[in-house]
Image (cartoon, grey):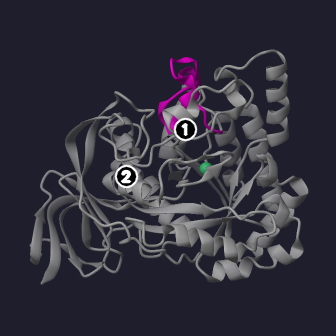
Amino acid sequence: MMDVVIRNGRVVTPGGVFEGDVGIVEERIAALGEGLRGNAEIDATGCYVLPGAIDPHVHLQMWAGDYRSSDDFASGTIAAACGGTTTVIDFVEPADAEPLLSALAARRAEADGRVAIDYGLHMTIDAWHAARPEELASLPEVVAVGVPSFKIYQAYGRLRLDDVLLHRALRAVALVGALPIVHSENGPLCEELRAEALAHGHIDPCYHALTRPARQEAEAVNRVIDIAALAESPLYIVHVSCADAVARVESARKRGEPVYGETCPQYLTLTADALDGPHGERFICAPPLRSHADQGALWAALAGGALDVLATDHCPFTADEKAGHLDFTTIPGGLPSVEARLSLAYTLGVRAGKLSLERRVEVCCTAPARIFGLARKGHIAPGFDADLVVFDPEAEVLLSADVLHEQVDWTPYEGTSLSGWPRHVFSRGRPIVRDGDYVGQPGWGRFVFRERR
Ligand code: MN
């Protein structure tokens, strides 16, 4: 006798689709099969049963200059849950001279007791820390408390590592068996192009994209791939946005190098044309939105395996915070999409014939769990956490800020109609979304100790 049985769903894993029941005992999946009996039974006829999705790239209540991303750990994880995401991985950003472990404790204090779903953290290695051998020597202590992934930037002021620091940091991360995850853009070159644009009076949002062209991203991707090879480090490139960068990742993989790539819904669904629209300023994010041709390359890479993960880089700022700037360079960058990711991937990916059912589960659930060391998540099999989504492929949702739970007054997907939305969501066996309504409790989520094998 199970505690809960999800009956007659079409269970999707990267290995295939089968019709049957999923049995839950306490917090874990206990059995798969037919005719399972439980104290509670949920009819999933006509629905897909998916592993809870994992979003390994979110920025909740994150300071960006004078602005703080508008979703906090409660609102952002409730929105994630409503969209079928049951684990997020956010970031620790230590200040200069702040020990990594102190920064980690401070970030955990912000999240613990407030998160609606389980969460993990990546540690950021900025230039101050990368330049100090005694700081890099503390990486094993960070890994020992369940943080085996380190964010590294090739752009952005104090966060940016030059090639020497990049090499040192990658070597240190590799030495402790952890994974570096890299924001790959050529920062100094983008700064030069921005200054040049401003000098010519080019202040409109479209210049954000024009001053961060695809080839500078590809150049940075290629460079970090080579430096990672020299440092004998694996590598995960976040938010790959363009065909040129995909090509660099693909050739590294063909050489057999352990390079992973991620893209995000915004790069698959929007183009730089949005920057010329009535609220162009809202669409500023980095890397910037690209072209239709780039979208095609990204879908193909996601489907074909040249890219591994679909994450969001969820980082919302309100319409007011985005508006009224003298030029494009001071607009806080980032877009919301933590809630709609899984459904966007279904309607615009699976239904449009660009992604198989299995591949969608792989890139949204299973691959992020495997790559980031979430040993009991991202898969439907006995022993795994009962993080499950009953996904109704016929549910029609017209996206707008009003229907989403994200704490932001606009969405880049305003007016997009989706066919398919989560009906029920379970987190460690407990229903947190029922019939589309959030029924969980902030604080239910826990910090997940991650371990890379
Ligand atoms: Mn990011």
Q: What element carries label 2?
A: helix
Looking at this view, is 107 or 296 the one in front?
Answer: 107
- Number of other residues with Cα within 10 Å of mark 1, as a class: few under 14, some 14 to 19, many 20 or more: many
Looking at this view, is 54 or 155 the one in front?
Answer: 155
Q: x, y (%) of residue 88?
A: 47, 61
Q: In which quarter of the image is the C terminus?
A: bottom right
Please state which amino acid type lies under the numbered disc 1: Leu
Q: What element carries label 1?
A: helix
Q: Which residue is depicted at the point 80% across and 60% down?
A: 229
> What span is in magenta?
266-286
Residue tagged by mark 1? 298
- Secondary structure mostly seen in magenta is helix
Q: Which circle's residue, 1 or 2, is located before the other in the chain? A: 2
Q: Is mark 1 within 8 Å of ligand 1?
A: no
Q: x, y (%) of residue 119?
A: 47, 67
Looking at this view, is 118 or 158 the one in front?
Answer: 158
Please state which amino acid type lies under the numbered disc 2: Ala
Residue 153 is left or right of residue 307, and the answer is: right
Does the segment drawn in magenta span residue 378?
A: no
Q: x, y (%) of residue 345?
A: 39, 43
Residue 417 is left or right of residue 163, and the answer is: left
Residue tagged by mark 2? 79
State whether residue 352 is above or below residue 292: below
Q: How far apart are the alpha carbons under marks 1 and 2?
A: 26 Å
Counting labels gives 2
Q: Quadrant of the N terminus?
A: bottom left
Q: Can residue 231 be seen? A: no
